[in-house]
Amino acid sequence: MIFFKRKRLIIWLIRAYLKNHGRTVLLFFVAGLLSFLILFLTKDFFISRFPFAHKETVGLVGAYDVNSLPSFVLLNVSHGLTKVDNNGKISPSLSTSWKIEENGKKYTFKIKRDVFFSDGQRFTSRSVNYRFSDVLVQRPDDYTIVFKLKDNYSPFLVTVSRPIFKKGFTGVGEYKLEGLKLNGNFVESMTLASRKNKYDTITYQFYPTYDSLKTAFVLGEVSDAWGLSDVKFKNSTFESFKQVRITKNVNSEKLVALFYNTQDSTLSGSKVRKALTYALPDTFAQGLRNSSPFTPNSWARSESVNMPIKQNYDHARLLLSEASGSAKLSFKIKTLPQYEDSAKEVAKSWKKLNVNATVEVVDSIPSIFQIFLGDFNISKDPDEYPLWHSGQPSNITRYRNLRIDKLLEDGRKEVSVDERKKIYANFEKYILDDSPASFLYLPYSYKVTRL
């Protein structure tokens, strides 16, 4: 009985309230409904203008000054006259077009209009501040620039893909420099802020070793660790960590190789070097097998010449016996820390050839070595003149071959892409036959992200 009396009382109170305030309740209900509908229909407008903060801290390994920072960092801040894709194809960036004349000695670029630096200044031909030796620069108007080279140089279009900056690291890209911390001449950290939303920032932290970067990630100093050679951490791996995503990629900007000291008494003959090459594994756990000086995507790579070199102990033993008879060979492989496992794998394969190899880990490219297992940066242009030409100090194998020298010289002078393909097909054929190096793999690169 008491329950029903309370129920009637509550109903009576609600009726009385609605009688006195019903219009107000209805008005606020309709207003709320309309407000919700307006917000729903205009959410994209407000979201695009509301300054949501997005802060990313990326850890990288390497010692860089402002001028040698990785290209993917620089391209956030500015662009060059051209751009180059992963296949080496060149297309306009800050230019709209170009014309090559005088057999590759004259390059005329038309500049894009309505491009502005992050400080608001318009980008014109006067903004192009590349410093080239033996190059005459002319600016007929604000949107035309002409380069006259002393000698024809076919990789020039790749050279002008380098990002252009004003003083103070001011560029035309999507981000602008917000902060820079130096340790001497080297960049310790740099923060970039989006030009559209200043709360959207990327901070790059640079570390001397992979171990120090991994430790920084575990301690929370960085949210992302990029470019790791593996995901090991002490006695565990990042794969066992919770709230961590691991992305595995092939680093097509580096090629790992065994560099032979061609002036060494045992390695001076090409048959010994080829025998060692034929005894190598067909796969490496640390990267994608690549037995050519060019990447699979390079337009210069010749499929007719470059059949993958497969492990063949019989052929290796035949070459070795022709070169050294029954003498047992011993070598020392010097290698960088990140390639120690690969060096041990190579030594294990050579042992089946009755070749003894010991491994020594070094911190940098050694000036004296028999065999060095390291890497080299793959140019966006197939020109490998600095690495293999006998007149270059960067030719660490001390390799001398007049035929290779001539091909390298011709390759960087020829303007026609079709003719350059023929030149580099011959270069590839003869360099693989002579084997001043054994090309191993494109290393895997790991990105570890905290979720």
Image: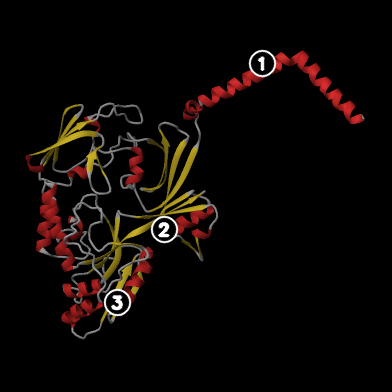
Q: Which residue is mark 3?
A: 350
Q: Secondary structure at mark 2?
A: loop
Badge number at residue 65:
none
Place of residue 354 in the rendered image (x, y in percent of width and height, measured from the top left): 28, 82
Residue 369 visible, this angle: no
Place of residue 160 in the rendered image (x, y in percent of width and height, measured from the top left): 22, 41
Q: Nearer the viewer, mark 3 or mark 1?
A: 1
Place of residue 441 in the rendered image (x, y in percent of width and height, measured from the top left): 30, 62
Badge number at residue 27:
1
Viewer-proximal residue among 242 and 78: 242
- Counting residues from the start of the chain, the first of labels 1 and 2 encountered is 1
Viewer-proximal residue among 326 and 2: 2
Q: Mark 1 belongs to which amino acid?
A: Leu
Query: How packed is label 3: few (under 14 Cα within 10 Å), some, or many (20 or more)?
Result: many
Q: Mark 2 belongs to which amino acid?
A: Thr
Q: Which residue is mark 2?
A: 209
1 and 2 marks in contact (CB < 8 Å) = no
Viewer-proximal residue among 230 and 213: 230
User: In the visual, does 290 lie left or right of 47?
Assistant: left
Q: Nearer the viewer, mark 2 or mark 3?
A: 3
User: Looking at this rendering, what residue extends furthest in the right direction?
Assistant: 1
**CA gap, disc 1 and disc 2:** 66 Å
- Counting residues from the start of the chain, the first of labels 2 and 3 encountered is 2
Q: Is residue 77 above or below residue 395?
A: above
Viewer-proximal residue among 125 and 25: 25
Q: Secondary structure at mark 3?
A: helix
Query: How packed is label 1: few (under 14 Cα within 10 Å), some, or many (20 or more)?
Result: few
